[in-house]
Amino acid sequence: MQYRALGRTGLKVSEVGYGAWGLGRREWIGADDRESMKSLHRAIDLGVNFIDTALAYGEGHSESIIGRVLRERRDTAYVATKVPPKNRRWPAPDDVPVSQTYPGDYIVSCCEKSLRNLGRDHVDLLQLHTWQDRFLDEEGWRDALASLKKSGKARFVGISVNDHDPASALRAVRSGVFDTFQIIYNVFDQSPESGFFPACLEHGKGVIARVPFDEGSLTGAITPDTTFPDGDFRNHYFGGDRKLQVFERVQRLKKLLDGEAKTLPELALRFCLSHEAVSTVIPGMRKVANVESNVGVSDGRRFSPAMREALRAHAWERDFYS
């Protein structure tokens, strides 16, 4: 496992982190706690030391699973979690004030709840789960985050940038308030490269790349005939003719598989790790086999300029979350 600096936090985090949304069970139907715990143990065995979760993932279930695993280990593991918006609206609507989304006392209460779920006295990174640029000009949330840092309950703070909207966080990057930024970055959504990543590099911010597999499409597992269990959020994400759209684009992407990347998941992860701004990438991997294949990508190799240039042609502007 290779490690990178998480901005200027002083933390060295594994290039491949553990995205723990799938451990929540509620949104990803079919998750099994025993299997999830085995996968997390295996990830830590292989050097993964950064785990990203959220209070909203299964209403704390993901955090509880992580807490159970870490109590069985003596390894150093950095845990990042997120405060959900009080109105439970993703992404943050542009007509609702921060006082209704992240009031100060609510942020503190959520952090305390996460700590109880995790069985810890601190979280390494506390992130706001949504963001709007105008929040910077409103009061309440900033003092709450500062107090949590001062008390040691949250060592560092960050935000999870709204889906496909890196421009909405540019002022936040320059503000000096946040230590890290979590953002969608994958072969299809390359938008952070144009302005967001340069700003993060200039200001020394840690970057957590999320959704590297585009919710599964960039693994090659989605075909026009793929079905999901009732209640699984992917029924919406890949609704209508989206599975066909994805399948056709992935078929074209497969033509790039060669000595630099032999499988689509490898291609997807190496793409993320080939950008110098990225501190860690957090694929979901609640099965041991997926852990082993994903972690194997952290070997120090980076894509050639020719491969990077070829991948630019596969950028795809769209929003399947809406």
Image (spheres, rainbow, N blue to C red):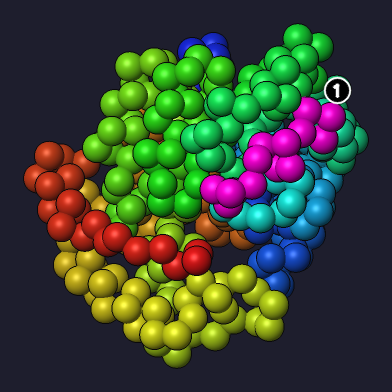
Residue 117's place in the image compared with 268, above or below, is above
Residue lying at 12% horizontally and 47% vertically, measured from the top left = 309
Residue 64's place in the image compared with 36, above or below, is above
Q: How far from the left and from the top, in percent, is residue 197?
A: 33, 31
Mark 1: few/some/many CA within 10 Å (<14, 14-19, 20+): few
Residue lying at 69% horizontally and 77% vertically, measured from the top left = 231
Residue 307's place in the image compared with 1, above or below, is below
Question: Number of callouts in the render?
Answer: 1
Q: For the residue labelled by badge 1, is the local secondary structure a helix, a strand or a loop?
A: loop
**In this rendering, position of residue 219 left or right of residue 70:** left
Q: Residue type at mark 1: give it.
A: Asp
Magenta region includes residue 284: no
Q: How far from the left and from the top, in percent, is residue 213?
A: 43, 58
Residue identified by numbered label 1: 121
Residue lying at 76% horizontally and 33% vertically, measured from the top left = 103
**In this rendering, position of residue 213 left or right of residue 41:** left
**In this rendering, position of residue 24 left or right of residue 113:** left
Magenta region includes residue 97: yes
Q: How far from the left and from the top, in percent, is residue 20?
A: 65, 49
Q: How far from the left and from the top, in percent, is residue 175?
A: 48, 18
Residue lying at 15% horizontally and 57% vertically, measured from the top left = 313
Residue 8's place in the image compared with 99, above or below, is above
Which stretch appears magenta?
Answer: 92-106
224 and 266: which is toward the camera: 224
**In this rendering, position of residue 301 left or right of residue 230:** left
Residue 78 visible in the current orientation: no
Residue 297 occupies quadrant: top left
31 and 244: which is toward the camera: 244
Residue 243 occupies quadrant: bottom left
